[in-house]
Image: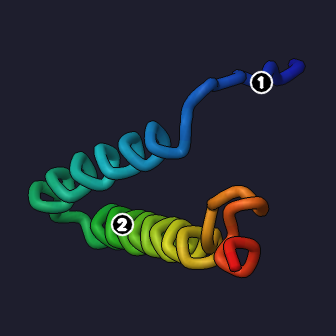
Amino acid sequence: MESEGMVLNYTKDDAVSILCQAMFDETLRLRTKSQTIERDSIRRFLTESAAILLESTSNMQNQEKHSGDKRPENLQPNMLD
C-alpha cells in the first residue's frame, strides 16, 4: 500500500494557532483521564509543545534584534554627514 502525502498551506502563525488549540484540548483531556499511561502521554505532548513554542518565540525575537536598521543604504547615518 502506497502512502500518499498531504500538502498543507499555512503560515507560521497558523501553525502556532493549531498547536495552541491542540495544547488546550489536551489540557482538558488531562483533567478527565485517570489512566497513568495516557496522562503521561498527554503531559509529554504538552511539555514538547511548550518547548517548540518557546523556541519559536526565541527565534522570532532574535531575528528582530538582528534585523538592525532597515533604512536604505543611501539613508544610513554615516551617509548623511
- Screen quadrant of the C terminus: bottom right
State the residue position of label 2: 46
Identify whether 36 is placed above or below 15.
below
State the residue position of label 1: 5
Q: In screen coordinates, is 50 left or right of 8? A: left
Amino acid type, residue under disc 1 in the picture: Gly
**Residue 70 position by quadrant:** bottom right
SS state under label 2: helix
User: Where in the figure is residue 76, as x and y percent of width and height?
Assistant: 69, 70
Most distant residue in the left direction: 32
Q: In screen coordinates, is 76 left or right of 36? A: right
Determine if residue 37 is in view: no
Q: In screen coordinates, is 53 left or right of 11? A: left
User: Looking at the image, which residue is at 61% across and 70% down?
Assistant: 69
User: Where in the figure is residue 23, as x and y percent of width and height?
Assistant: 31, 54
- Screen quadrant of the N terminus: top right
User: Looking at the image, which residue is at 33% across and 71% down?
Assistant: 43
User: Looking at the image, which residue is at 28% across and 67% down?
Assistant: 39
Identify whether 43 is placed above or below 6.
below
Q: Nearer the viewer, residue 64 or 49?
A: 64
User: Where in the figure is residue 41, as x and y percent of width and height?
Assistant: 40, 66
Identify whether 74 is placed above or below 7.
below
Q: In screen coordinates, is 71 left or right of 73? A: left
Q: Nearer the viewer, residue 36 or 11?
A: 11
Whichever of labels 1 and 2 marks the residue nearer the N terminus, that label is 1
CB under 8 Å between discs 1 and 2: no
- The local crowd at label 1, few if under 14, some if 14 to 19, many if 20 or more residues have their Cα within 10 Å, is few
User: Where in the figure is residue 37, as x and y percent of width and height?
Assistant: 36, 68
Marks 1 and 2, Cα distance to the nearest angstrom? 26 Å
SS state under label 1: loop
Amino acid type, residue under disc 2 in the picture: Leu
